[in-house]
Amino acid sequence: MGDAEAIILQTVGQVREESKKCGFTVLNHIGDEHLRKKYMAELEEVMVSCAVAEYKVKIARQAARNAKSLDGSEAAETEDVGELFDQCLRSLEDDTDQQEIVNNDSSVKNFRTLLQNEESGDNDNDNEDGDLIVTQQEVNLIDPISMKRMTDPVRNKICGHVYERSSVVNMIKQNRRKGFCCPNVGCENRERLKMDDLEDAMDVKREIVRRKE
């Protein structure tokens, strides 16, 4: 299952990234409000499907482990190994709330936050300048690694901090042996940063575009 699992997860990751890029393009280049909301809703469905697919791969992996760990007597009672796997899989599915898994998925949450920000901006045009000031205060566009203004920001899915893509990718490559943790001062996340931990920071990208206009 190893190779198939890796291919599925890699495909899910690619679909997620492309969906986020499409969302960013829609929000910045589709002027028709009806079409914009329609496309974003469809992209949200894709993001949810990705979260579900990843969840199913993970519980299938766990079900396989559980089936292997059953003692010989239990395994002997089952005529088919596949049936034993199915039993473990059903047990895991019954013990988890799929909707909760989706709602807690970082990519889905970030995409929904982007939608909420867009909706609040559409509904409050009279206070556009005020909202812009608040956004500029809250969104930091300085890369904590190079200390330069970001142009291609990515977010750490573990702790939520944002970096310039080229800077963080170079640091990860340069510190493959000893590892590289989040460089933000005071960050409590001490896990080694991996390429898979990074995702496009669409909200920060939009702010960069807005400040250029």
Image (cartoon, rainbow, N blue to C red):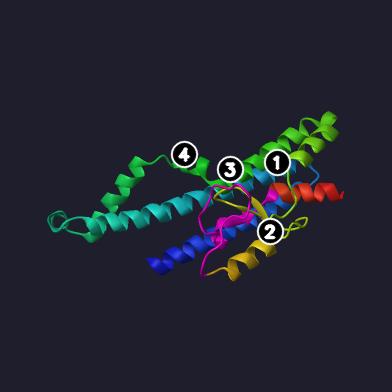
Tags 3 and 2 touching, CB below 8 Å: no
**Quadrant of the rendered structure where residue 175 is?**
bottom right
State yes or no: residue 180 in magenta: yes
Q: Residue at x 84, y 29 (%)?
A: 126
Q: Which residue is mark 4?
A: 100
Q: Residue at x 75, y 50 (%)?
A: 141
Label 2 SS: loop
Q: Main secondary structure of the magenta part?
A: loop
Q: Residue at x 53, y 62 (%)?
A: 11
Gap in angstroms between the C-alphas marked 4 and 3: 11 Å
Residue 78 is tagged as none
Gap in angstroms between the C-alphas marked 2 and 1: 36 Å
Q: Which residue is mark 3?
A: 109
Q: Which residue is mark 2?
A: 145
Please identify, in this view, whether the residue under mark 4 or under mark 2 is nearer the observer: 2
Q: Amino acid at mark 4?
A: Glu
Please identify, in this view, whether the residue under mark 2 or under mark 1 is nearer the observer: 2
Gap in angstroms between the C-alphas marked 4 and 1: 24 Å
Q: Earlier in the sequence, mark 4 or mark 3?
A: 4
Q: Amino acid at mark 1?
A: Lys
Q: In the rendered view, would you say 7 is above or below 85?
A: below
Query: Which residues lie in the magenta part?
Result: 177-202
Tags 2 and 1 touching, CB below 8 Å: no
Q: Amino acid at mark 3?
A: Lys
Q: Callout 1 environment at 10 Å: few (<14), some (14 to 19), or many (20+)? A: some
Label 1 SS: helix
Left or right of 122: which side holds 45? left
Label 3 SS: helix
Q: Which residue is mark 1?
A: 37
